[in-house]
Amino acid sequence: MAFTLPSLPYAHGALAESGMCQETLELHHGKHHQAYVTALNGFVEKDANLQGKSLEEIVKMSYGKPDMAGVFNNAGQHWNHNLFWPCMKPNGGGALPGKLEAKITSDFGSLDKFKDAFKQAGATQFGSGWAWLVVGKDGKLATAKTPNGSNPLAEGTGTAILGVDVWEHSYYLDFRNRRPDYLTNFLEKLVNWEYVDSLLAKA
Amino acid sequence: MIARRTALLAAGASLLIAPRALAQAAAPSGPFTLPPLPYAASANEAAIDAQTMEIHHGRHHAAYVANLNAAVAPHSQVAAMPLEQILARLAEMPEGVRTAIRNNGGGHANHAMFWSIMGGRGGEPSGELATAIARDFGSVATFREQFERASTTVFGSGWAFVTVTRDGTLAIAQKPNQDTPLMEGGRVLLGNDVWEHAYYLRYQNRRADYVRNWWTVLDWEKIGARYASAKAGTLTI
Ligand SMILES: [Fe+2]
Ligand SMILES: [Fe+2]
């Protein structure tokens, strides 16, 4: 069965007041994410080895294989954007659910230290890529960054419970070259902490 | 002499405003400088809007220059080297700043080259360069097709280049992020920036449209001069 573009869990204009305008979301979801899904389906159609595999299986089996770079890029980006959309909500940010905040405080020292580390990861991912909050194999929370379509699932660095897209298409209409401002805004006004908390509970 | 006195005065003045002097030390003003655009920001309007040109040059390129200067500041031997030599000898750069030099030195060289080949009205290459394109690609049309394919298939941020050897041979190359053929000791005839910041305000996700329009603002006379310099061994970045 072909992979499909998930619908956004909010209207395309719903994050405009929180620093992500309708045009950004229409393009990002309807054009960029859709293009990854379409390209991935094209690869699956042509390759019997990919047919019947889950998205996670395809991401893992194509990682680090030069002859599967196209598959990996598009599968990775489909997986990444699937995680990204529900990580945001209108009027996001604000107070964290108690369990999540306690875990962050325990593993990073304080909520502010986590935020600094997460923003640092996003700001220093040179070129296109992603920044993450992962539950590592040791059970501890850690930040991570990955280039282009890669992710912690592929790299085996843990279970991602929060991801932010730092490709320029994520923020160029709203923030131009100011990626650090986009990251601050993401944490303060866009993150759906309840969703992150639900992923932590499952991790 | 005047320059030296100004420097001394500046040093004296900075003693009175120590915090600012510290801030300046963190962001040294040299040895590398942002070259001014060799034309108005609106000069490439046929393919690139003026706002994109201003942000691209005044913010993105300026940041590469500032970060490169900060990276080489503690290393006077590196700071004294020409950029193309620094990039060709990346492996010898101090480990702590090697990645910063790669990203920002590459960014500086790539963008300086990029501005210098635009500001024209497109058209066709001529003379020796036209002959070389016909020889190495079959025709100008094939050359364009191959270069456009290289530009549209860079996944994520990066560049498409045409490299030129000392004997005048041309080839197409793709590089991620701010890497450049200079890092292999090669020379660049021309290159197109396909980071999203190069085209997003006007073209959004339609990189292919940007790449197709880009030909209309190339200055083939300047590119022809780069070709002659490459063969003479005088082309740097
Ligand atoms: Fe994206
Ligand atoms: Fe650029």
Image: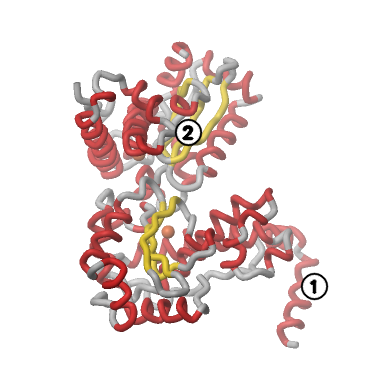
Kind of element beneath mark 1: helix
* Mark sitting on residue A203: none
State the image coordinates of residue A174 (x, y, percent, origin top left).
37, 47
Chain designation of label 1? B
State the image coordinates of residue B229 (x, y, percent, origin top left).
46, 80
Toward the bottom, the furthest residue is B1
Residue B9 as seen in the image, left or right of residue B113: right
State the image coordinates of residue B62 (x, y, percent, origin top left).
52, 63
Residue B44 as seen in the image, left or right of residue A94: left
Of B149 and B106, which appears nearest the observer?
B149
* Mark sitting on residue B12: 1
Q: How far apart are marks 2 and 1 (CA)?
A: 44 Å
State the image coordinates of residue B127 (x, y, percent, origin top left).
30, 83
Q: In which quarter of the image is ligand 2?
A: bottom left
Q: Within the image, what quadrant is residue B21 found in?
A: bottom right
Chain designation of label 2? A
Q: Within the image, what quadrant is residue A163 found in?
A: top left
In the image, what residue type sits under mark 2? Leu
Viewer can see residue A111: yes
Q: Within the image, what quadrant is residue B72 found in?
A: bottom right
Kind of element beneath mark 2: helix
Q: How crowded is mark 2: few (under 14 residues within 10 Å), some or many (20 or more)?
A: some
Residue at the (36%, 22%) spot, across then down? A56
Of A112 and A85, which appears nearest the observer?
A85
Residue at the (66%, 24%) spot, across then down? A109
Q: Name the residue under label 2.
A: A187
Of A46 and B48, which appears nearest the observer?
A46
Residue B71 as seen in the image, left or right of residue A177: right
Quadrant where the image shows the N terminus of chain B: bottom right
Residue at the (60%, 60%) spot, across then down? B68
